[in-house]
Amino acid sequence: MTQRLVIATHNKGKLVEMGDLLAPYGFACVSAGELGLPEPEETATTFVGNAELKAEAAMQGSNLPSLADDSGIVVEALDGAPGIYSARWAEIDGKRDFGHAMKRVHEELGANANRRAYFISALSFAEPGKPIRSFEGRVHGTLVWPPRGSRGFGYDPMFLPDGYTETFGEMEPLAKHAISHRAIAFMKLVEGMGWKVTPGAVPAMTLLMKEPR
Ligand code: IMP
């Protein structure tokens, strides 16, 4: 039996990615966007705070279990910036440009020798009538300049994870997914919720591809 679950996002890419991760556990995912739910303003000051307010709003609006994520990059020598403003640092003339965001990080670091940073992902799961649960994943590394690689997204090309010689922008996507902050948070979620793989579950991508266009 599958359980309907709302992914608190209006981003189709995130829906497919989360849907694929969740499908083995017997969840059929629908996005907050598809349900016409409004996007709440991310007014919290922490990643978990923002993930919780998105999950809570989707659960209230749909009366279904809802999952939300919030992520970003935290740079030690910049007192944690860009942090929850990681996406906003890329905004220029109403568009997102991560070349611009990476350059800003590089310029603000200046001659500072401390290049330590981590990516963080917070996942919050809200179910009607139950306390909200949140899980956090981090991957630590150093920042390089100039950026390397054209894979991934966001700040990937300037992030060298500890113990590797390739940046997230150079790595095979599957290699990144295996060690990423999102993967760690997701594993903690599955473990924390006690979810078990459902025999015969179909990956969400397959379901999407079968839908008439
Ligand atoms: P949000 O979670 O959709 O608010 O996005 C957070 C922002 O953090 C993204 O737009 C990216 O800039 C950055 N970010 C989060 N995860 C990653 C990652 O895995 N690689 C590169 N950038 C990331």
Image: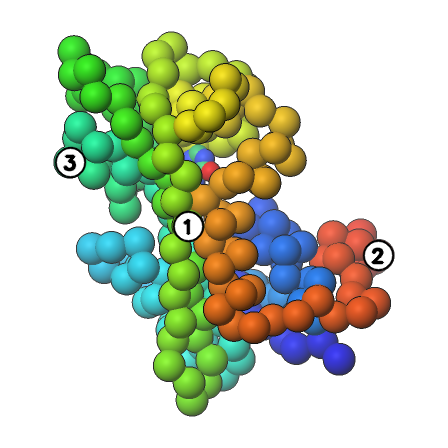
Kindly identify the amino acid type of the residue bearing the numbered disc 2: Lys
The quarter holding residue 105 reads: top left
Residue, disc 2: 210
Residue 132 spot, x, y in % from top left: 38, 75
The disc at residue 79 is 3
Left or right of 142, for residue 58: right
Residue 129 spot, x, y in % from top left: 42, 89
CA neighbours of label 3 inside 10 A, class few (<14), some (14 to 19), many (20+): few
Q: Nearer the viewer, mark 1 or mark 3?
A: 1
CA neighbours of label 1 inside 10 A, class few (<14), some (14 to 19), many (20+): many
Residue 182 spot, x, y in % from top left: 49, 48
Q: Residue at x 46, y 54 (%)?
A: 185
Q: Residue at x 71, y 63 (%)?
A: 24
Left or right of 12, for residue 72: left
The residues tagged by marks 3 and 2 sit, at their Cα atoms, a distance apart of 47 Å
Residue 110 spot, x, y in % from top left: 17, 14
